[in-house]
Amino acid sequence: MTGNEARRRQSSGAALCLSALLVLGAGLSGCAQDDPDEPPAAAATPATRVCDGALDEPAAKALERLGGTQGFYESPGENPAGEPHTFAFSRAVASLRDGLTRYAGCGIHLTNGTKDSRPISFWIEAREDPLRKEGPDRRPERVTYYPLGVYADTRDGTSALLQFRCRVGKAGHTRPYLAVQMSHPDAKARESATSRDRMTVLTSFARTLADELGCAGEAHLPEEAPDPVSS
């Protein structure tokens, strides 16, 4: 064998070894990326299924305009009582009938990660007295009233409030009114939704709550949010 042939064989062998190492390294790298202990990313939930299915089709479309997306993510994890943050009417109804006067409804995020956006939040409150319109001299800017329930308004482009008749609580300690509130401080939501969209979402949520509590006849909430009134 000549010196040139020996060098070519040595060079070819080194190249084969290098190729084998590269293939092995790629395989190991691919294995390292798959973590069996890491849970898969949560899938987005359509608007018709958030908040325990509280929203009808018009309200779901309004929520999509409000959030600028067709998929949502409810708050993960559990509260201090060990209950999941995912909203359920059964738990809300049980708590209100047991005398709780303020209950946190569902929290809806626009992205899969609670740190990326502040949620669209719903609250439920049992009250002794009806809410009333504020006088013109005390009325905040951008408030819009609706002839709905006992009292209804949207304000500042970030919230909606609806109060209706529904007696809840323990025997001897009931309250005659329920108020539901929705807030969505995210800037994207403020730019993409109208006052009517916010009230449409809240009306559907409140109507479903009244049905679950058995006070729909007392609440008198319509299938569709009415047009706003000027004063």
Image: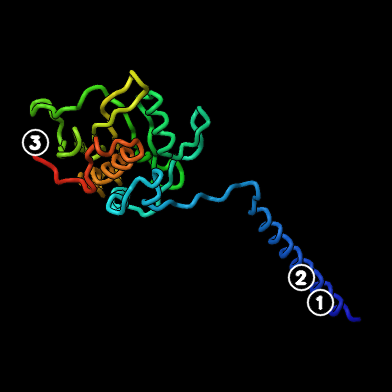
Farthest top residue? 172
Q: Which of marks 3 and 2 is nearer the N terminus?
A: 2
**In the rendered image, which residue does mark 2 sit on?**
15
Disc 1 to disc 2, C-alpha distance: 11 Å
Q: Where is residue 180 in the image (x, y as percent from the top left)?
A: 29, 34
Q: Residues within 10 Å of mark 2 (few under 14, many from 20)?
A: few
Q: Residue 189, relative to residue 179: is it above or below?
A: below
Q: Position of residue 183 (x, y in %)?
A: 30, 37
Disc 3 marks a residue whose amino acid type is Ser
Q: Which of marks 1 and 2 is nearer the N terminus?
A: 1
Disc 1 marks a residue whose amino acid type is Arg
Q: Seen in the image, is 193 located left or right of residue 85? A: left
Kindly identify which numbered label has been placed on residue 231.
3
Whether residue 194 appears in this view of the structure is no
Task: Residue at 14% x, 39% y: name it.
Answer: 147
**In the rendered image, which residue does mark 1 sit on?**
8
Point out the image quarter for the N terminus: bottom right
Disc 3 to disc 2, C-alpha distance: 84 Å
Image depth: mark 1 or mark 3 in front: 3
Quadrant in the rendering for residue 219: top left
Q: Nearer the viewer, residue 113 or 145?
A: 145
Q: How crowded is mark 1: few (under 14 residues within 10 Å), some or many (20 or more)?
A: few
Q: Residue 66, relative to residue 137: is it above or below?
A: below
Q: Seen in the image, is 65 located left or right of residue 139? A: right
**Judging from the image, what secondary structure is the residue with disc 1 in?**
helix
